[in-house]
Structures are given as C-alpha cells and as structure tokens.
Image (cartoon, rainbow, N blue to C red):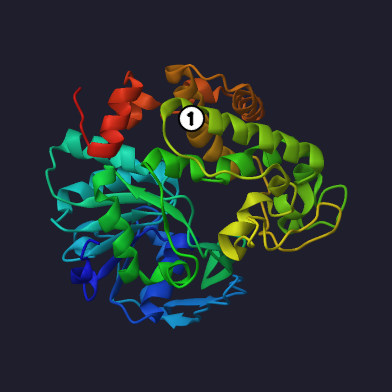
Amino acid sequence: MKNMEYLKDMPIAVLGGGAVGKTCAADMKLAGREVRLFDLEPFAKTSLRDVDKTGILLDGVQRNKYCFERSGRAHFDMVTSNIADAVKGAGLIVVAMGSWGHEPLFRALIPHLEDGQVIHVFTDNFACLLFRRLMRELGSTKKVIIGGWSSAPYGTRIESIGKFQFPHVGAKYRAISLRGAALPMTDTEAFIESVKYLPCMDAVTYGDGPVAANTVLDVDFANVNPVIHVPATVLGVSTMENWGVIFCGNDKTTYSMYSHGLCPSICEVQYKFYNEEIALADAIGVGCPRYKYEMFFSRRSVLTQEYMGLDENGNDNVVFPLDQPSNEGNTGPNTIHHRYMTEDVPIGCKIYHDLGVQYGVPTPIIDSMIILAGAMHKTSFFETSRYNLAYLGIDGMSKEELLAYLNEGVYNR
C-alpha cells in the first residue's frame, strides 16, 4: 500500500464554485482541514460573491445507507480567483466543475503544479485524458497524480431564487461507494489511498469504500449521467416543457426528471444505451460496471446503489417503483439548455460514438440521442462538439496503443 500520509496536514484546494465545489469545500472545512475555494473568472464574480464573509452553510437530507452526515456553516481559509494562490503548497486538489470548464481551468492550473500533488476530478468525464494531453502540450513534467471519479460524492444543489444564489448548499444524498482510477493506472494505488485524507469522501471511506477501476475509461463508462440523463431528458421533453405551462400549476422548477419523466419505455432505452457502453468497453478491453436489467426500472435508476448499496444477493437495497410517486430525485431539468443535454450529449454521448467509430462498435441508440438532442438545439453535435478523440489525445490509437497509454502511460505519438 502506498504511503500518502504526507497529505494529512497539507491544505486542500477546491477548484469550482458550483454546487459540488461548494459542498466539497464546506464538508472538508467542517472536518477540520485547511480549505481554499477557487473559481475561474468571470464566474467567480457571482459564484464567490461574499463567500469570504458568509461562508457556506451545508445541510440537507444527506441520505445514505450508513447515515453519515456532516452539517454546519464553513468559513474558508481562502476564497480566491487567483489559481496560483489557491494551489500553492496544496497537497490535494479537487476539481469540481462542469466539463466545459476543464480546459480553461487546466491551462491555468498546469503552470502552477508542484511535485507530489494529487488531483481528484469529480466527475471525470474524460478529464484525465484531457489533463495529460495539456500537460504534454504545455511542457509540464511535474510529478503529479491525476485521477477521476465516476460521480460526485453528493447529489447537491445551491439554494437560489431566480439568479440570486444563497451561500447555502443542500445535499440530497451522499455516495457510499464510487469508482475511480488514475492516468496512468500505475498511479491508481496511490490515488485510491489518498482518499483517506480527502474528507469530502468520508462517507465513501467509512461506507462501502472506493472501488479501483481498471482504467480511467472504465471510470468514464461508469459515469451514469449520460445513460440516465440523456434518454430521460430527450424522450421526456414534452413533460418537461409542459410542466408549469399547461399542467401542474405555474411553477416549472418543481419538475423532476426522476419523479415525473421516467417511465418503463424510457427505461428500456436506457438499458439499451447501457448495453452499447458494455459493447464499447469489451471491444476496447477496459472495464465497465455491470447492472442487472431490473435495476433500470426504478425512479432513481441505477443511481440508488451509489448511496444505498446492494444486498447480499447483489440487488438494490432500495427500489423506487415506477408505478408509485416519489420525491426522492433532485428537481430539474427545466429546459433543453441544461447540462443534462448541453454536457452529457456533446461530451459523454459524443465520445462514446467516436470510440465506437474508432474500434468498430455500432452505437445506434447513443447516436439517436445525439441526433435528437441536436435537432432540438438546431445544430449537429457531431460537428460542433470540440470533444473528440483528437481533443483527448487518443485519436488513431490501436487498442494495444490505447491500453499501453491507459495502463503504463506509454505515449508514442
């Protein structure tokens, strides 16, 4: 086991001022660590406004099998939009922001890296591949560990009214197990061990524990966002757009994809989508979590096991039947201009499609989601998304070359 104890008393930098970033930062400060909260400009003008004065209040149901909970108001050691100040001397760096922010963040971060730093990305969404590509491009040779996770440690939201954001995050649930890996895989043992010193993962550490994936592509196939969000949003669009317009009062914000959008037919599509991911993973030779057919037919889909676990027979401990109402799921989306479409389609679905083309695996269900979402947005995400295999630095690789890169970091291009 790698000894990562040197991280124990080092500052933690949280990069991202959204719901996950603020929740991670508050959670870790309440655990007694030195925490610095950073966001990029121009977003910081809004996301970090007055946070140095107010701190962040963390509360919420925080549902999980073991009832792990941490609540309170956290005041940070630093709130800044200066990346150099945020990461100087930090042992652990948490990247917690939407994927469209990864490239500008990484370009700002890489020149300030220090040997020995460990970077955790929530959610990975191909971030590790992009990070290593940008390190090569920028000529950085710093000895850092970069790894990603299949999901965030929480389902969480910022309290807001209109465009005003309160300094308050409410966690709906806490994950008790997440899937993670480093790039290259030779760093994964140290990456997983470093979780012990990352308090935003305490519910995982003291729960069922982190699971070491077999590559970062395994982590990306384990990201449940595309398979859950995209079919439910694309195929449930009429319910979403009519919510608060011709039925259910006049409040669009109460719509929940989980509570109101899912139905047996959409769940069937999600299952077919998932099987295309399995086919991709198998063709490439990387892992992918295995879910039973019936696990998709719940109002929380396969997400429930992240925070409620499985029983002794490998079945969900908790199921939310489709024929019964439930308010378990977070609200949203309220528009097609939501990350469930604008991130999960042109990034997650698009890269799955491109991997299918490169390795000879048809992805008709995934492709149909890209086409339909593009039609709604009056564009072609096949053409307009900058996310492709060249962007990640893995275009034209044979399966053997890709596996050598993922596992040993061998990059001969």
- Give me the residue at 20% from left, 47% from top: 110
Horizontal arrangement in the rendering, residue 409 relative to residue 344 (left or right): left
- Give me the residue at 46% from left, 68% from top: 23
Residue 262, image x and y in percent?
A: 76, 46
Residue 19, image x and y in percent?
A: 49, 62
Give the residue at the far front of this rendering.
313
Q: Which residue is mark 1?
A: 282
| Secondary structure beneath label 1 | helix
- Quadrant occupied by the C terminus: top left
Residue 382, image x and y in percent?
A: 51, 22
Horizontal arrangement in the rendering, residue 69 relative to residue 331 (left or right): left
**Toward the viewer: 28 or 385?**
28
Crowd class of label 1 (few under 14; some 14 to 19; many from 20; radius 10 Å): few
Q: Is residue 49 visible?
A: no
Instruction: Place residue 104 in its image quadrant.
Output: top left
**Toward the viewer: 252 or 217?**
217
Query: What kind of residue is marked 1?
Result: Asp
**Toward the viewer: 159 or 140?**
140
In this view, 166 is above or below 215:
below
- Give me the residue at 26% from left, 63% from top: 92
Horizontal arrangement in the rendering, residue 351 relative to residue 342 (left or right): left
Horizontal arrangement in the rendering, residue 399 relative to residue 57 (left or right): left
- Give me the residue at 53% from left, 63% from top: 175
Residue 177, image x and y in percent?
A: 49, 61
Q: Is residue 257 visible?
A: yes
- Quadrant occupied by the N terminus: bottom left
